[in-house]
Image: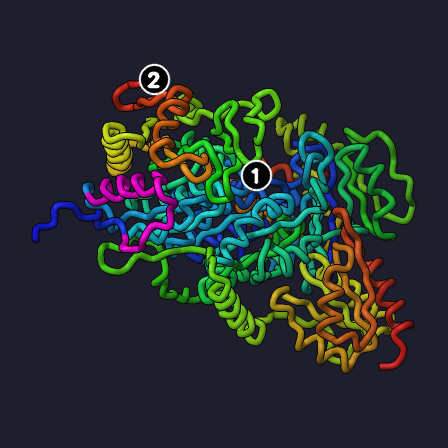
Amino acid sequence: MTKSILLAGFGGQGILFSGKFLAYKGLIEGKEVSWLPSYGPEMRGGTCNCSVIISDTQIGSPIIANPDILVAMNLPSLDKFENDVVPGGQIYVDSTLIERKVQRDDVEVFYIPATKMASDNGIRTLANMIIMGNIIKHCDDIPHDNIDKAMAKVVSAKHQDLLGVNINAVELGYNY
Amino acid sequence: MAEKVLMKGNEALAEAAIMAGCRHYFGYPITPQTEVAAYMSKKMPKIGGTFLQAESEIAAINMVLGVASTGKRVMTSSSSPGISLKSEGLSYLAGCDLPALVVNVQRGGPGLGGIQPSQSDYFHATRGAGHGDFHMIVLAPSNVQEMVNLTFKGFDLADKYRMTSMILADGTMGQTMEPVLLEQGEITQYEKPWATTGTKMERPHNIVNSLFLKPEQLEVENFKRYERYKKIEETEALYDTYRMEDADVCVVAFGIGARVSHNAIDEARKAGIKAGMIRPITLWPFPKAALKEAADKVKAFISVELSMGQMIEDIELATRCAKPVMLCNRVGGMIPTVKNVYDSIVEADKIGGDK
Amino acid sequence: MAVVFDKPHALTDAPFHYCPGCTHGIVHRLVAEAIDELGIEGRTIGIAPVGCSVMAYDYFNCDMIEAAHGRAPAVATGVKRSDPNNIVFTYQGDGDLASIGTCETVHAAARNENITVIFINNAIYGMTGGQMAPTSLPGQITQTSPYGRDVATVGYPIKVCELLSNVDGASYLERVAVNNVKNVKNAKKAILHAFKNQVEGKGFSLIEVLSTCPTNWGLTPDKALKWLEENMIPYYPLGVYKDRYSGEGE
């Protein structure tokens, strides 16, 4: 099993953070993992993306040309990466921020109004984790286990008080 | 036993340096290696070490020279344009026979170039890091664990041979986060009777110097240095192989190039092409023997690089041009794709002819 | 027979290579005397420059490092940071300190790096054979200003003490000369003070020493001393430019 996941959106949406969550979850589950952010001026307020690979075997390149899973948290990201997803892959769309539908019919698509859900539940900054929860729901290779352990690793020591809300956000997405 | 943790290559390297006993870091901000400096600025004050943001790369490398003169482990890190500025100091470190660790997280060039990954400082690192006859030990990590292990190795070899070790990484290795085991064996302590630590009025003064105005003497200094280099070439070359047992096509790649090639080789094997890889871990000394041996068995070599064919020269020299060497490259911050490498393998398999 | 005059312990027995009448020898001696008097030779590390005093590493008995051109303050920074108990001095000429090494000089001062800088200003490049220095005087004839330094095309001399007196970090700045007995005695006091500052942890001290270069000035040693007095001192006034601990020059 090798799953390549491309997470993309605006800076500030927690793209890198949610990627780290998936990577740590994989690590805890004994998988090989890699996490690679886009970097440079584009990090500063523009689009932001991050590649995560989770595998049973040694990972070759950490760069993802054709993801198995795409998470699009804004329109430019969907426009840019939609056609790169492998046939039979999955696309997760934050439907609060992206009005259009995915054009392809050879991929599974999940529309989650994550930003609205986050806002309705008073966790405005956690749309990213809601989508992570939805991935866990639909992707067999990313099981509904070790969420608390992985979260404890990625939430910094200073912000351990935010552990609970992050886990709740994942569950919210899982149950959507 | 230590637990595997997820770390960015740049940060893992910095932590490894601290574990290796490095307590002095001098640097100047430049993308894409800034995490190394940031990590050091956070950590060093807490452990009684020195982090100093120098006024320039030139100053930073000379501060490194100052600490190295006193026999302590010291490092600096930068990226390509900054490494050009450090070239003067690299030559002086060599001329003074001082141990130091220098990290180059390469970006595209020449000039200001770009900030995306590159390997185009290959020549600089392996051949021309500054004026005069000298070498550095050049270590090329291909994953985050090697960013750690080669940092340990780099400090050890630097002390052992009294020379600069350079970690030649690329932006991808610096930015990628992978699980790492931060574990180091026993650190070998080397005697440094040459260090300028003050005479304590107990010994004649030590002089750290690269100036020898008598040509006979300067010649001897160079000969002595190359005696050491010869020993390093014979004993310290490191490489890894992948699916080479029965390979017809041998990919030669390092750093991110090797990671991409790994996937391409798997694809080629699926398509029935016997491809394998020799991955140099030390670029100087270049693993000549392994390449030479492979030349007897394979049809062709492919140099996969993020540069304009710089490593090809080493492959051709090592194999005495016994087999064709093709180039598969992307430059300017572009990275060869799995497909780029795969296509090269298919082509090499065709044109390579008989074994 | 009683010894009434000896060389300082901090100087080796190696004969100086300096030209007749060159004042480097005097300044070397003053530095060595200061090291002796403070009893710091065993923990002193000197940094030699590129220039006429490049081989200063052979003349001082303490540990010595030969730095790249202009980089002595950076090397000194490394040595000092390696062990703050070390007493670290640089010995630099005007090309080294005020031209190619201006950046390193200014920033070592800005950091108030606890080192002692001995700056030899003789208004010319000596080692390479008499080219214009950053401190050559307006109108001064050198090999590369054969018609005299024309400030309209090559600009004005750099006044290092004045420049650094505006750097908040610097602790002690004094300009002295070694053209007569009285001035030599003052220079000795200043150099001793600069080393003492370091021993006491008071930070960056720089002593600018107006010096002669009879060979490249094309003058006899005695005429060179006179030239220094009549031409250099008026342009580069002697005195303390900054003393953080007495408030002078602040």
Residue at 61 percent of width and 55 percent of height: B129
Mark 1, chain letter? B
Residue C56 image position (x, y, % from top left): 37, 48
Disc 1 versus disc 2: nearer the observer? 2
Which residues make up the magenta segment? C12-36
Asked if residue B306 shows in the view, the reply is yes
Task: Identify residue for label 2.
Answer: C250
Q: Is residue B155 left or right of residue A126?
A: left
Mark 2, chain letter? C
Residue at 78 percent of width and 45 percent of height: A70
Task: Identify residue for label 1.
Answer: B29
Q: Quadrant of residue A154?
A: top right
Asked if both marks, 1 and 2, belong to the same chain, the answer given is no
Label 2 SS = loop
Mark 1 belongs to which amino acid? Pro
Q: How far apart are the two marked residues, 1 and 2, measured between alpha carbons?
A: 33 Å
Residue B176 image position (x, y, % from top left): 64, 50
- Residue B298 lies within the magenta run: no
Asked if residue B41 shows in the view, the reply is no
Residue at 52 percent of width and 40 percent of height: B38
Mark 2 belongs to which amino acid? Glu
Decide: few, some or many residues near mark 2? Use Cα within 10 Å; few <14, some 14-19, many ≥20: few
Considering only vertical position in the picture, is B223 above or below C103?
below
Residue B343 image position (x, y, % from top left): 87, 62
| Picture quarter with the C terminus of chain C | top left
Q: Nearer the viewer, residue A144 or C75?
A: C75
